[in-house]
Image: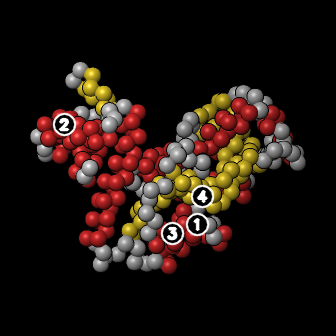
Amino acid sequence: MTLRHMKIFVCVFQQQGITRASQELHLAQPSVSLAIRELEGYYGVRLFERIGRRIYPTECGKEFYGYALHIVSLFEEMEKNIASWNTAGKIKLGASITLGTHVLPGIIKEFQSLYPELTVNTVINKSSVIQLLLLDSSVDIGLIETSPSHPDIVSLPFMQDELCAIVPPGHPLAAQSQVPLSSLLESPFLIREKGSAVREILDACFSLRQLSPNILWESASTQAIVRGVQEGIGVSILPYLLVKKDLEAGLVEQAPLLHPIKRDLHIVYHKSKYLTPYMQAFVELCQKPASI
């Protein structure tokens, strides 16, 4: 099998059809169909199911796509890097919103002081989105708040964060030395949106303890939640990294939980990713406590 077969397969998979793939590749439809048949014949498997005028990837086809995409992406990356070998290097980073706001800037500043010739491109988004970007090679290395859900992503814990219960100033729970989670949830609860890393951790925590919070607010904005708590609308649990300044300013107070909720933060990259010396240096820098 050739790289051409892999490129055609990837395009058919992404375009969800022979016709659109042939237009994208500027090839005749019979040539595209033949390449898919040759792949199926070579491996002795069915990669697509043909139903009516549409095709759908089989489970084997979905598995094959992961390998084919990385073969094609690695080749394209090699060609691009070799062509620009004499120019400055580049690294593509991704980070969850919390880490991209409070951790990554300091690491990048130190990293670029060590490698001023390097171009660092960065994407800040939800942990789940960063994982998807790793899988299609849009990002080289990511920093996320949850353990990766995909088996093709390598994970290296590099620091630990604690989720912090916050209450309005003067709230009785702030004066207690230890607050059971059930006591905190007697108040209306303000929480991050579904799909966020914090929400996933809290939902699992509540489920484990068989607790049902009275969710009054659900927001993608941490500052909206902090402001709601400040105004006495309810209580919340957020990463300490995000509320540290608000606590120091006295806008909200901390209710020390009886059972602290801690989590590992992760360096992630695709298991098939070739880590250049720059990438390896970035990983090592993240793992140094002085960088945090």
In three-dimensional space, the C-alpha distance between marks 3 and 1, rounded to whole angstroms, equals 10 Å
Q: Is residue 165 left or right of residue 69?
A: right
Name the residue type under label 3: Gln
Q: Which disc number belongs to residue 33? A: 2
- Disc 3 is placed on an element classified as helix
Instruction: Count neighbours of disc 1 (C-alpha within 10 A) and say few if under 14, some if 14 to 19, many if 20 or more.
Output: many
Query: Who comes first in sequence, dot 2 or dot 3?
Result: 2
Query: Who comes first in sequence, dot 3 or dot 4?
Result: 4
Q: Which residue is mark 3?
A: 280
Q: Which residue is mark 1?
A: 286
**Residue visible at 44% across and 52% down?**
134
**Residue visible at 34% across and 35% down?**
45
Query: Who comes first in sequence, dot 1 or dot 4?
Result: 4
Instruction: Count neighbours of disc 3 (C-alpha within 10 A) and say few if under 14, some if 14 to 19, many if 20 or more.
Output: few
In three-dimensional space, the C-alpha distance between marks 2 and 1, rounded to whole angstroms, equals 47 Å
> Is residue 46 depicted above or below 130 in this figure?
above
Asked if labels 3 and 2 touch by Cβ distance under 8 angstroms, the answer is no
- Disc 4 is placed on an element classified as strand
Name the residue type under label 2: Ser
Q: Which residue is mark 4?
A: 156
Looking at the picture, how far across and down is residue 31, in whole percent? 14, 41
In three-dimensional space, the C-alpha distance between marks 2 and 3, rounded to whole angstroms, equals 41 Å
Asked if labels 2 and 4 touch by Cβ distance under 8 angstroms, the answer is no
- Disc 1 is placed on an element classified as helix
Q: Nearer the viewer, residue 243 or 85?
A: 85
